[in-house]
Image (cartoon, rainbow, N blue to C red):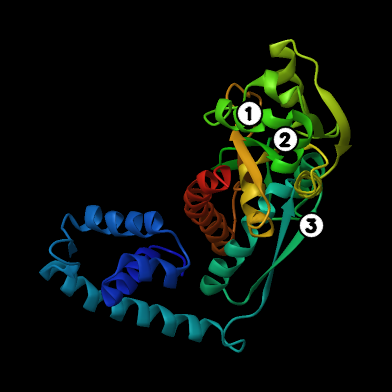
Amino acid sequence: MYSSNRSLYCFMVAAEELNFTRAAEKLFMTQQALSSHIKKLEQQYDTVLFERRPRLRLTAAGTHLLSYAKKTIQNERSLMRYLQDDRRLERVRLPVGIASLRAKTFIPQILINFRELYPNVVPSFLRANNFNCDSMLRSGKISLYFGMNAPLDFYGERRELIPDKLYFVVSRFLLEQVLAEGWRDFLERNSVGLLPEDASRLPLILPGADSELRPALDSYFDQSALPYNIITEVSGQDVMLELCAKGYGACFISHSVFYGFRSMYREEQIYAFPVPGLTGLHDLSIFFDNSGGTPQYVMDFIECSRSTVEEMGREIESHLPKLQSM
């Protein structure tokens, strides 16, 4: 459920379960994300909603808010059913450009949340680079696009969604193959941050020269004045991660991409290390034209994207330490 009622819905589930663990599982989110929604409501209404001891229970204010939340959620659902009637709302197409594949992690959840708000708006996605997306935005062929950095003569406005971070990813198989008995020492030395001299000891899968990540990685190794052993250049972080899982080489992966493919590697022994000192990365952003006459559903799609990515970003951070300790 999207909009300000999302926190109310999370509170309602927690109040009915009176168990944050079960409520978080039911909501398909982390306990940290659920607690964030509860805290937001407590700050908004300047009151305490739950007593934690001796057991979890609602305060008087919490009981009153639960009654209000149920009515509000029911009213919103009634509104959604009304809007879903094709006789009352004509279907509208929303053309969206994708200039960064890192947006793929977030788009499915964005679509789920946005459909609850506008069931008759049909998003249509086009894959292109930043320059072409910007040209299509100028000509009105798309309403907005997801990208990592703006073209030099960028047209329109920008909303930052999430900062980019890279993790160095390597399989246990490769570490044992290259470092033999020293592979555990590698894990310990790099647990709080990758050391360039250790990365240079391993065969590397890097993005191609035309990738937006490659200049940042080249600069990272140039600053350390260390040679690095490139065995393959690949277009697409998903392919890089597949090769890494098979022990072919180590690679640098965006945290959002790693999160998106995490379920594929739960049974694999793969380690991820943060990369300090890496500069030149860009934030994932939405670019759009707000010069006048922008439909409200477009602005709501942007806000839906921002709030969805913000919530998923917190979940990404909660998963990464688990992945690093596999």
Q: Position of residue 299 (x, y in %)?
A: 55, 57
36 left or right of 310 in image: left
Quarter of the view holding residue 293: bottom right
Q: Secondary structure at mark 2?
A: helix
Residue 183 against residue 104 in the figure, above or below? above
Q: Position of residue 206 (x, y in %)?
A: 81, 33
Circles 1, 2 touching at the beta carbon (< 8 Å): yes
Label 3 Cα neighbours within 10 Å, binned few <14 / some 14-19 / many ≥20: some
Label 1 Cα neighbours within 10 Å, binned few <14 / some 14-19 / many ≥20: some
Circles 3, 1 touching at the beta carbon (< 8 Å): no
Q: Position of residue 81 (x, y in %)?
A: 49, 85
Q: Residue beneath label 3, please?
A: 126
- Outermost residue on the top side: it is 225
For the point 76% across and 23% down, which residue is it? Answer: 201
Looking at the image, tell me whether mark 3 or mark 2 is earlier in sequence order.
Answer: 3
Closer-to-camera residue (183/234): 183
**Residue 175 badge:** 2
- Disc 3 marks a residue whose amino acid type is Leu
Closer-to-camera residue (223/295): 223
Residue 199 against residue 302 in the figure, above or below? above
**Residue 186 badge:** 1
Closer-to-camera residue (29/94): 29
For the point 80% across and 48% down, which residue is it? Answer: 246
Q: Nearer the viewer, mark 3 or mark 2?
A: 2
- Outermost residue on the right side: it is 232
Quarter of the view holding residue 175: top right
